[in-house]
């Protein structure tokens, strides 16, 4: 029987989940997506996560990726979700909504990072790499030979007076109706600052916008190679399911 798990990725605009083949990193069946409730309070998100579990007809443990720094299973930040998440005990919260089943919660970009390092592009598992998830915000995962340094928050680094994700997330591109060239120029500025500070061997770019990487990656001029993530924006789901398998509970 295929070893499988359920992963759920909580984003600023949508909450996505699916069953994952843990041997290959591939999704089993269709991905489930529900719009993120507004406001995205802990209980509202908890109920949406429970609905995804019900639709998946899954009765095992659940891995959940959140856009938050997760330490000792407490959410310490609230990026693109409601501020009431700060200091939330995520085990208590999801235990209430998921009938006290086993739950493993980690940062969403960290989930994408461990998935990409295991099942994605080789550059994620060799040398130093920074994975960036470009979506509502900019998530980041630091990888060294495939091992994760958790809870980095490069999207909130101030670059010329503005947070990086307020300057160059894919949500900014959509909101300002920027051309690919205009957006690439903004992203280039962000990547050059990351390069200056951290000197990675590679940037690996994921999120939904990575599906159209051929339209904007060639427009970047940063010296460090910029490589599209192979798992695209499925990586958070896969990494969340992997957190269950690996018993990851930061």
Image: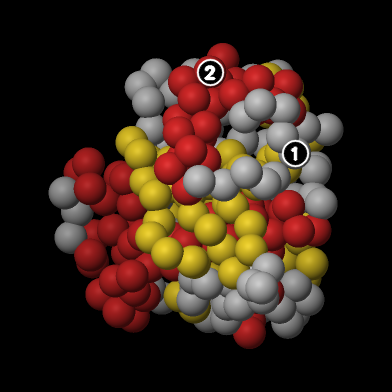
Which labelled disc corresponds to residue 102?
1
| Vertical arrangement, residue 51 with respect to residue 227, above or below | above
Residue 129, given in percent of the width and then of the height, sits at 66, 71
Residue at x 64%, y 72% (from the top left corner): 2
Residue situated in front as seen by the camera: 165 or 21: 21
Asked whether, in this view, residue 54 is left or right of residue 69, the answer is left
Residue at x 63%, y 81% (from the top left corner): 123
Query: Is the residue marked by circle 2 packed among few (<14), some (14-19), or many (20+) residues within 10 Å?
Result: some
Q: Helix or strand or loop: what does disc 1 sit on? A: loop
Residue at x 80%, y 43% (from the top left corner): 249
Residue at x 42%, y 37% (from the top left corner): 12
Q: Is residue 19 visible?
A: yes
Residue 213, given in percent of the width and then of the height, sits at 34, 74
Residue 73 found in image quarter? top right
Which labelled disc corresponds to residue 43?
2
**Earlier along the polypeptide chain: callout 2 or callout 1?**
2
Q: Is residue 132 visible?
A: no
Residue situated in front as seen by the camera: 152 or 198: 152
Which labelled disc corresponds to residue 133?
none
Q: Helix or strand or loop: what does disc 2 sit on? A: helix
How many dots with numbers?
Answer: 2
| Vertical arrangement, residue 109 with respect to residue 192, above or below | above
In 3D space, how far apart are the residues under numbered discs 2 and 1 (Cα atoms)?
A: 18 Å
């Amino acid at each position: 029987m295929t070893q499988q798990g359920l992963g759920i990725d909580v984003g600023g605009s949508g909450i996505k989940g699916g069953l994952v083949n843990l041997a290959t990193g591939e999704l089993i069946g269709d991905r489930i997506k529900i719009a993120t409730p507004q406001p995205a309070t802990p209980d509202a998100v908890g109920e949406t996560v429970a609905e995804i579990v019900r639709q998946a007809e899954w009765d095992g443990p659940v891995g959940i990726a959140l856009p938050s720094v997760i330490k000792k299973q407490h959410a310490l930040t609230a990026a693109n979700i409601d501020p009431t998440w700060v200091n939330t005990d995520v085990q208590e919260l999801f235990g209430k909504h998921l009938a006290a089943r086993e739950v493993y919660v980690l940062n969403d970009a960290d989930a994408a990072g461990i998935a990409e390092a295991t099942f994605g592009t080789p550059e994620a598992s060799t040398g130093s790499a920074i994975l960036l998830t470009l979506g509502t915000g900019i998530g980041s995962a630091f990888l060294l030979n495939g091992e994760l340094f958790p809870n980095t928050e490069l999207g909130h680094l101030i670059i010329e007076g503005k947070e990086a994700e307020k300057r160059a997330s894919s949500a900014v591109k959509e909101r300002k109706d920027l051309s690919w060239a205009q957006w690439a120029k903004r992203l280039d500025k962000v990547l050059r600052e990351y390069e200056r500070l951290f000197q990675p061997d590679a940037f690996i770019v994921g999120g939904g916008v990575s599906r159209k990487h051929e339209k904007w990656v060639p427009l970047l001029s940063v010296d460090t190679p910029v490589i599209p993530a192979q798992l695209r924006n499925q990586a958070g789901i896969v990494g969340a399911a992997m957190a269950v398998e690996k018993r990851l509970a930061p």
